Amino acid sequence: MNILGIETSCDETSAAVVCNGQVLSNVVSSQHCHSAFGGVVPELASREHERLIVSITDFAVTEANITKNELDVIAATAGPGLIGAVMVGLCFAQGLAYSLGIPFVPINHIEAHIFSPFINEGDSHQHPEGSFISLTVSGGHTLLSVVAQDLSYEVIGRTLDDAAGEAFDKTGKMLGLPYPAGPVIDKLAEKGDTSFHKFPRALTSQSQTSKSYFGNFDFSFSGLKTSVHTWLQKQTPQFIELHLADIAASIQWAIVSVLVEKTILAARSRGIKTVSIAGGVSANSTLRKAMKDACDKHSIFLHIPGIVYSTDNAAMIATLAGVKLTRGMKAEHCYNVAPYASFAAGARKAGLK
Ligand SMILES: Nc1ncnc2c1ncn2[C@@H]1O[C@H](COP(=O)(O)OP(=O)(O)OP(=O)(O)O)[C@@H](O)[C@H]1O
Ligand SMILES: [Mg+2]
């Protein structure tokens, strides 16, 4: 079954073809028009998607070595995301499905991130045995969920303010780094000292009594942001420039250590032996290594997506559509874009929409 996936929820225009759980093509075009603004400008994002969606889709189909007439299903992100951006992909995908006379499957973007570590494992293997803990860390979300074998979800923790990706991007902006700052901090930190300055870690064992800490899987990164801001104000530009790598490493470790600590705590408290990480921040090299070390220490099995499947991509949209169809989900038309389709609010039971 050839499934075309379309992803346009934010600033990546992507199309992919997945056949029986194997990725045949995955074309991703990242928008660079936002870097001057320090964040994504929604109107510019929609226009860029509209400009590129046809050619990116053609490219993905050609790369897969098939023709459009050989497509069996089309899937697209229906939310959450920027409303205009989601609409471009959703309307285009449904129009194409309608013209080809094939079914359409709407997909929740965050649910697709959660399944990204299992891309390329084949339709029948795209879920570990039993439940697993998913840490989903992206530009807009930071969630800890228990994912059951039947694809139902229980969100047990979420950020109370900024997402982990935002923490990277906003503190990076304070350091004068381009948007998105996450990958730049990751690179800079390779040569930095994580213990150069200890920035605060909210809602962790260090900041709370053991009573309020255990069982609290929520995150908070706004205090870190304020702390970086006030600390930087006290430093000279020369000092900041000289120690940029050390500062980046210290900020990164303040974020990563919290993510690792909470994830392991969640797995241990639930007695779950499988963990996965997903979303753009799961591309972070320090998070990948620290999570692996912590999982090894506690005999927990870790699933990590390939780097190209960490940030937004259409392979994860097509892959999840395949998993859902294999499990009996019916294709349906989707006329409602869900820009704020909060994963956290809507995902406590099966049937994310
Ligand atoms: N190597 C890295 N280290 C840290 N952060 C990274 C890295 N690579 C990407 N990111 C961060 O990942 C985020 C983008 O991830 P993603 O594309 O999944 O988010 P999004 O789609 O905008 O948000 P959402 O998925 O919540 O709708 C950005 O904040 C970016 O800085
Ligand atoms: Mg995303």
Image (cartoon, helix red, strand yellow):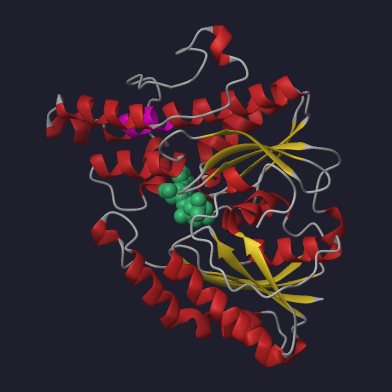
Quarter of image, res 221: top left
Image spot of residue 260 (x, y percent): 57, 28
Quarter of image, res 75: bottom right
Q: Quadrant of the N terminus?
A: bottom right
Image spot of residue 42 (x, y percent): 35, 65
Q: In this orientation, does residue 73 appear?
A: yes
- Which residue is painted at 41% across and 36% down in the image? 161
User: Does residue 216 belong to the magenta stretch?
Assistant: no
Magenta span main SS: helix
Q: Viewed as shown, does residue 231 lie left or right of 328?
A: left
Q: Viewed as shown, does residue 83 lie left or right of 22?
A: left
- Which residue is painted at 61% across and 57% down in the image? 309
* Segment tinted magenta in the rendering: 247-252
- Which residue is painted at 31% across and 30% down in the image? 247
Viewer-proximal residue among 219 and 87 = 87
Q: In this orientation, does residue 192 appear?
A: no
Viewer-proximal residue among 338 and 271 = 338
Viewer-proximal residue among 169 and 10 = 10
Q: Is residue 133 above or below residue 197?
A: below
Q: Viewed as shown, does residue 206 lie left or right of 238?
A: right
Quarter of image, res 44: bottom left
Image spot of residue 255 (x, y percent): 45, 31
Q: Is residue 250 above or below residue 10?
A: above
Q: How many marks?
A: 0
- Which residue is painted at 65% across and 58% down in the image? 353
Q: Is residue 271 above or below residue 160?
A: above
Image spot of residue 316 (x, y percent): 65, 61
